[in-house]
Image (cartoon, rainbow, N blue to C red):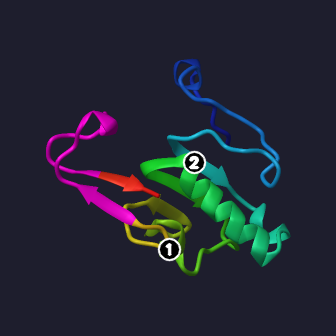
């Protein structure tokens, strides 16, 4: 039994192939599916890719990996384990500095009057 995605859904989704190591990624993705690929990379390359995936996902976005590709320290990449093999990008502290700005001005046009977060 197979499944087929309706055209009305396909038309709202961007499907894209990339060279994971060489290409830069766009940002604000809701979902990145990278299954059964990471097992072929060195630990150094995996580390780089998990950071790239994290930067490419919007806050709350999800990374879905294969069954042999568990991330052992997800907070290193700003992920929290959502479910088995599903990692949600969070605002958890990592090696990066996270600042909360309580009074935003024109320089921070995306801020609300309450708080905003800036990743450096």
Circle 2 SS class:
helix
Give coordinates of residue 27: x percent, y percent. 56, 41
Counting residues from the N terminus, which is met first, the one under dot 2 or under dot 1? 2
Tag 2 residue? 56
Is residue 65 in the magenta section?
A: no
Q: Which contiguous range is marked in magenta?
A: 98-116
The residue under the point 62% across, 30% down is 14
Give coordinates of residue 90: x percent, y percent. 39, 61
Where's the N terminus, which quadrant?
top right
Above or below, 57 against 6 in this view is below
Say how many tags the image has: 2
- Mark 2 neighbour class, 10 Å CA radius: few under 14, some 14 to 19, many 20 or more: many
4 and 7: which is toward the camera: 7
46 and 87: which is toward the camera: 46
The residue under the point 43% across, 56% down is 119
Q: Quadrant of residue 63?
A: bottom right
Res 116 visible: yes
Res 65 visible: no
Above or below, 55 against 40 in this view is above
Tag 1 residue? 95
Separation of disc 2 and disc 1 at Cα?
A: 17 Å
Q: Residue furthest bottom?
A: 72
The residue under the point 59% across, 25% down is 10
Give coordinates of residue 43: x percent, y percent. 76, 77
Circle 1 SS class:
loop
The residue under the point 15% across, 41% down is 113
25 and 119: which is toward the camera: 119
């Amino acid at each position: 039994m197979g499944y087929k995605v309706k055209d009305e859904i396909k038309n709202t989704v961007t499907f894209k192939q990339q060279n994971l190591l060489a290409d830069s990624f766009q940002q604000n993705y809701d979902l990145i599916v990278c299954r059964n690929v990471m097992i072929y990379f060195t630990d150094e390359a995996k580390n780089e890719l998990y950071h790239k995936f994290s930067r490419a996902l919007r806050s709350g976005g999800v990374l879905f990996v294969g069954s042999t590709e568990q991330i052992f320290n997800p907070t290193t990449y700003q992920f929290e384990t959502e479910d088995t093999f599903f990692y949600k990008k969070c605002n958890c502290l990592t090696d990066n500095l996270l600042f909360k700005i309580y009074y935003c001005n024109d320089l921070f046009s995306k801020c609300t009057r309450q708080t905003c977060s800036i990743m450096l």
